[in-house]
């Protein structure tokens, strides 16, 4: 059931006043409050639906113009929001040593293609390519306190550089492949020529990978003095550049490791159940090949809240990342019964 928005929600009214000086006039500030109210109370949080539900607005384009044309700056609003949240939660946050900053990305799917930078992005969950925006986000967690910190919009290389347009300009007689592998080979053939075009090169230099955006979010959190000690991210972000920046900023980090990642065999000694070293062939071994060699007796139970995990830890070296602590974890009663 849709609810009409007859005024700002009480929680918005209670906290919005700290943002008042960031808006030029009363109307801008009112649109700001109405949009926040719509995000809180409506199930359908699209701009079109929020506009429909604001009863007092005679002109339904007001809210749209507020976001697209009004002279206010979202960066300043976010800066003020973070300062305010850190002040308000100071008494209930946990110790800085236990606080974490989480990096991840998500898909905000759309049904239309008129949005700026909308594109088809890969969904790992169901192996599809929905029309969406793909923001990379940072999220803060400290005890009972948790809130979003910042975001950066990821744009696919081909969308960011208008790649297909330039291919058609420089290679009008060559069809663009549609399959992933053929398209990758096609990139290798045509991209060196495209980069000789100053206009394409300018767009090429604007492209940022998700790793680049993750580093930017880490730097932004540091600039805002967000108090945390640990950086969390999944295997997609486990790259040398991000890990190096975390170490430079003196932050611990935790990530997932893909099972095909290689470990340097000369960096550790694995022992069997009798305590004898297990011989490993070659300079590297994949994680998926190492795990079956770990004796069941090497695992130890670790209880987290009401769940028990059987874990084994080992200090190893990962090519490109250096020395890390690897944690192999199974649910229930260990690897044999997981």
Image: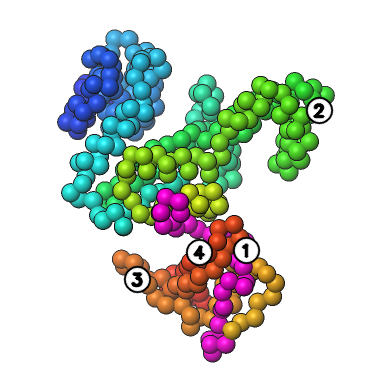
Q: Earlier in the sequence, mark 2 or mark 1?
A: 2
Q: Which residue is the site of mark 2? A: 174
Against 165, residue 305 (above or below) is below
Taking the image as shown, residue 238 lies to the left or right of residue 46, namely right
Q: Is residue 133 left or right of residue 70?
A: right
Q: Which residue in the structure is indicated by mark 1? A: 262
Residue 304 belongs to magenta span: no
Secondary structure state at the residue bearing disc 4: strand
Distance between mark 4 and mark 2 Cα atoms: 47 Å
The one nearer the camera, 37 or 139, is: 139
Give the residue pinned by disc 4.
324
Front position among marks 1 and 3: 1
Q: Residue at x 69, y 26 (%)?
A: 164
User: Are discs 4 and 2 less than 8 Å apart at CB?
Assistant: no
Pointer 1 with pointer 3, Cβ within 8 A: no
- Residue 250, image x, y percentages: 41, 54
Alpha-carbon neighbours of circle 4 within 10 Å: few (<14), some, or many (≥20)? few
**Color style of the picture:** rainbow
Say whether disc 4 or disc 1 marks the residue closer to the N-terminus. 1
- Residue 241 location (% of width, % of height): 54, 48
Residue 180 appears left or right of 313: right
Q: What is the magenta segment's predominant secondary structure? A: loop
Q: Which residue is mark 3?
A: 303
Q: Tell me where the magenta segment starts and ends, as one range.
A: 247-276
Label 1 residue SS: strand
Identify which residue is drawn at 31% across, 48% down. Answer: 227
Q: Nearer the viewer, mark 4 or mark 1?
A: 4
């Amino acid at each position: 059931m849709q609810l009409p928005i007859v005024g700002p929600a009480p929680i918005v009214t209670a906290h919005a006043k700290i943002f008042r000086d960031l808006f030029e006039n009363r109307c801008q500030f009112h649109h700001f409050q109405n949009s926040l109210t719509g995000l809180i109370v409506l199930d359908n949080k699209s701009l079109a639906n929020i506009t429909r539900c604001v009863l007092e607005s005679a002109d339904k384009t007001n809210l749209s113009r507020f976001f697209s044309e009004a002279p206010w700056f979202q960066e300043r609003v976010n800066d003020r929001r973070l300062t305010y949240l850190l002040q308000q939660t100071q008494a209930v946050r946990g110790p800085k040593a236990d606080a974490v900053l989480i990096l991840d990305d998500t898909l905000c799917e759309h049904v239309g293609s008129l949005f700026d930078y909308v594109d088809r992005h890969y969904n790992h969950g169901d192996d599809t390519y929905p029309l969406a925006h793909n923001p990379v986000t940072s999220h803060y967690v400290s005890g009972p306190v948790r809130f979003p910190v910042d975001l950066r919009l990821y744009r696919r290389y081909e969308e960011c550089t208008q790649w297909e347009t330039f291919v058609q300009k420089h290679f009008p007689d060559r069809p663009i492949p549609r399959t992933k592998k053929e398209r990758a080979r096609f990139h290798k053939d045509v991209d060196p020529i495209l980069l000789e075009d100053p206009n394409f090169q300018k767009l090429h230099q604007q492209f940022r990978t998700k790793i680049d955006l993750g580093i930017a979010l880490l730097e932004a959190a540091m600039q805002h003095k967000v108090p945390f000690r640990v950086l969390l991210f999944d295997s997609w972000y486990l790259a040398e550049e991000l890990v190096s920046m975390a170490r430079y900023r003196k932050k611990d980090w935790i990530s997932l490791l893909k099972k095909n990642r290689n470990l340097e065999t000369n960096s550790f000694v694995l022992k069997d159940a009798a305590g004898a070293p297990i011989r490993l062939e070659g300079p590297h071994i994949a994680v998926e090949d190492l795990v079956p060699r770990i004796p069941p007796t090497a695992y130890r139970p670790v209880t987290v809240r009401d769940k028990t995990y059987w874990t084994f830890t080992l200090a190893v070296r990962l090519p490109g990342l250096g020395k890390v602590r690897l944690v192999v974890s199974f649910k229930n009663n260990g690897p044999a019964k997981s």
